[in-house]
Image (cartoon, grey):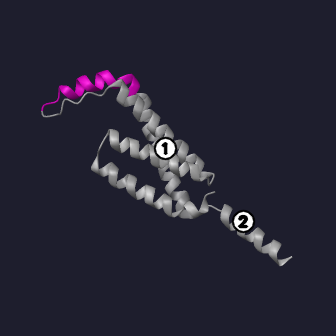
Amino acid sequence: MEENVQQEQTNQVKTERPVFLTVLLILTFIGSGLGLLFGIIGLFTAGSASSFMSGIPGMPTATLTTGMVISSIILSAASLAGAILMWQLKQIGFYLYTLAQIVALIITFNWFALVISVIFVVLYAIHLKYMS
């Protein structure tokens, strides 16, 4: 009888999402959601944004291509899907999120994004024990 009660308590503890993990996931929902939204908007404004940016003195002449925008949308969607799976306490979500972050960093190397991505991946990795 006591074993059944202990087993139920162990199962209950394992399925509860820690508050800090919930906060991390909400931040990821916001960041990935905004990335997805801006990517979709970028599909319609990619050409005009590039021509506008090239007209500003001292501004680098980087071209915002449709391919870059589409890759941004795909990676934001993958990050969002990973966060949704982690919300459901599924480990596969962590791996999907991490893969999306690595690919995004390879495509657009940015020191700030690197630091933020590493922090989030490490914090999610610490919470893997709560995911199945």
Q: Nearer the viewer, residue 103 or 31?
A: 103
Q: Residue at x 46, y 61 (%)?
A: 123
Q: Residue at x 62, y 55 (%)?
A: 89
- Disc 1 crowd rating (10 Å Cα; few below 14, some 14-19, many 20+) is many
The answer to whether residue 70 is seen in the rendering is: yes
> Which residue in the structure is indicated by mark 2?
12
Residue 90 on image: x %, y %? 61, 52
The circle on residue 79 is 1
Q: Residue at x 40, y 58 (%)?
A: 119
Residue 92 on image: x %, y %? 57, 49
Please, is residue 86 above or below residue 72 in the view? below
Residue 28 on image: x %, y %? 48, 49
Residue 50 on image: x %, y %? 26, 25
| Magenta segment boundaries in residue numbering | 42-57
Q: Amino acid at mark 2?
A: Gln
Per the image, label 1 sits on a secondary structure element best described as helix
Which quarter of the rendered picture does the C terminus lie within? bottom right
Q: Nearer the viewer, residue 31 or 94?
A: 94
Residue 45: say if magenta: yes
- Disc 2 crowd rating (10 Å Cα; few below 14, some 14-19, many 20+) is few
Q: Is residue 51 left or right of residue 3?
A: left
The answer to whether residue 29 is seen in the rendering is: no
